[in-house]
């Protein structure tokens, strides 16, 4: 093990993590995380630090519960699994401390904060993900073959095996929300009037933020708004960062392949918007799709998909922040934007310089809520939304 503290230790650490994410096996991940404990011990030995660090352990356990909820693990089983890992890690570190007290310690150690700890965090996240996906029983022989780290005490080994065997998962996202008392709603905050905020630290507002509060009230739980973005939306959902995404999300088949979409609550379509003094130039899609026309678009959503599918000659200009994108039109840095009518009409009211250039829409579009592929949770959201549509709640919020 001491050979890993040579010049190439950082490369070896990267290889360890690559194996962890490629393999995806829970026991292999546990083994690879515990294999790093001699390096943690070396840092502590050389810096005169004790093996036990209660403050750090509390941080790890809190993070473990958060990671576990991303993957449907109950807080109790996440805490139990990572507490057992902590005890296993300490048993390994004590083994090395005892050896070094007898035979002499290492001359060098890797950088704990800059090199080892980030990899431990990444492996911890991978362990939570693997625990959420693993559904088979683990026998003692299999565990011993996979988790074979020098210095792991029999008591710590038994406790870790028991924690692996006792992993508990929620039967549905709905059960998780009700038992934890928290509804996590992903939203971009850059798409008025559905979801908007002035900056990264400003509060969220908008139609879907109001409806998210009403959904949380219907569930009897606390609402937590989780920032996301259009390019990250699907990845964040699949990583379990939130329970539902709300904020003017279009119903499209590509999203339905990997997630569920609720019943629609708004129907509209895309239209062009431009400076009013140039609006007559963009009275059709053919007039827009011409060389020299600059079409500004926010990346990652249906606006960019439409531009990529329908425009061949116009120049596409990407603008990352949808909150400021209309300033590009006002300042003459772009000629036209194609977006949903509800947003275009709102921006035309906010900015008198801008006008919608077409009376009809270029597409048919429905807005809905994006959920993980969980039938019980989808059924609840659809029932809540259908009732809110029928009794006028959605119309009043709009």
Image (cartoon, grey):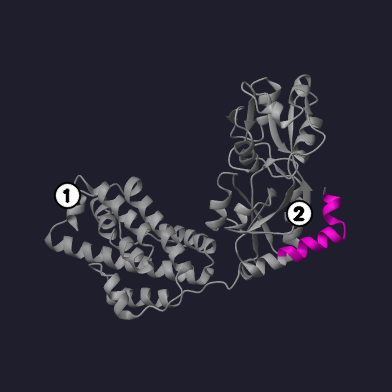
Tag 2 secondary structure:
helix
Q: Main secondary structure of the magenta part?
A: helix
| Residue 240 sits inside the magenta stretch | no
Give the image quarter of residue 390: bottom right
Q: Does 141 sit left or right of 65 as displayed?
A: left
Q: Residue 309 carries which label?
A: none
Magenta-drawn segment: 381-397
| Residue 388 sits inside the magenta stretch | yes
- The answer to whether one can see residue 220 in this image is no
Identify the residue at image location x=82%, y=63%.
Answer: 387
Is residue 83 placed above or below 238 in the rendered structure? below
Q: In front here: 229 or 92? A: 229
Tally of numbered tags: 2
Check disc 2 and report the residue beneath it. 211
Q: Indicate the position of residue 292 as horizontal and vertical percent values.
A: 62, 20
Quick one: label 1, few (<14), some, or many (20+) residues within 10 Å?
A: few
């Amino acid at each position: 093990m001491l050979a890993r503290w040579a010049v190439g230790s950082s490369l070896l650490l990267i290889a360890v993590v690559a194996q962890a994410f490629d393999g995806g096996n829970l026991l292999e991940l546990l083994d690879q995380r515990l294999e790093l404990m001699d390096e943690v011990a070396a840092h502590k030995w050389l810096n005169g630090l004790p093996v036990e660090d209660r403050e750090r352990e509390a941080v790890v356990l809190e993070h473990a519960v958060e990671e576990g909820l991303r993957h449907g693990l109950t807080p109790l089983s996440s805490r139990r699994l990572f507490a057992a890992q902590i005890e296993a890690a300490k048993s390994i570190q004590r083994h090395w401390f005892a050896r070094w007290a007898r035979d002499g310690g290492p001359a060098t150690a890797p950088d704990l904060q800059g090199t080892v700890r980030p990899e431990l965090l990444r492996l911890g996240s991978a362990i939570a993900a693997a625990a959420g996906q693993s559904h088979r029983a683990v026998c003692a022989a299999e565990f011993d073959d996979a988790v074979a780290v020098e210095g792991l005490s029999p008591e710590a080994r038994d406790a870790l095996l028991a924690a692996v065997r006792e992993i508990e998962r929620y039967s549905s996202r709905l059960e998780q929300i009700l038992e934890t008392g928290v509804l996590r709603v992903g939203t971009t905050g850059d798409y008025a009037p559905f979801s908007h905020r002035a900056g990264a630290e400003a509060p969220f507002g908008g139609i879907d933020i109001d409806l998210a509060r009403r959904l949380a009230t219907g569930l009897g739980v606390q609402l937590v708004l989780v920032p996301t973005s259009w390019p990250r939306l699907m990845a964040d959902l699949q990583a379990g960062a939130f329970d539902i995404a709300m904020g003017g999300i279009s119903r499209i088949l590509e999203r339905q392949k990997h997630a569920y979409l609720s019943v629609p609550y708004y129907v509209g379509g895309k239209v062009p918007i431009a400076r009013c003094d140039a609006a007559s130039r963009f009275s059709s899609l053919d007039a827009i799709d011409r060389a020299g026309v600059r079409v500004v678009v926010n990346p990652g959503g249906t606006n960019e998909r439409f531009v990529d599918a329908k425009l061949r000659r116009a120049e596409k200009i990407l603008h990352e922040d949808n909150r400021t994108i209309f300033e590009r039109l006002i300042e003459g840095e772009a000629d036209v934007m194609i977006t949903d009518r509800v947003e275009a009409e709102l921006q035309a009211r906010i900015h008198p310089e801008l006008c919608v250039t077409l009376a009809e829409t270029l597409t048919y579009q429905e807005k809905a809520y994006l959920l993980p592929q969980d039938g019980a949770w989808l059924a609840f959201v659809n029932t809540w939304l259908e009732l809110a549509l029928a009794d006028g709640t959605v119309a009043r919020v709009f």
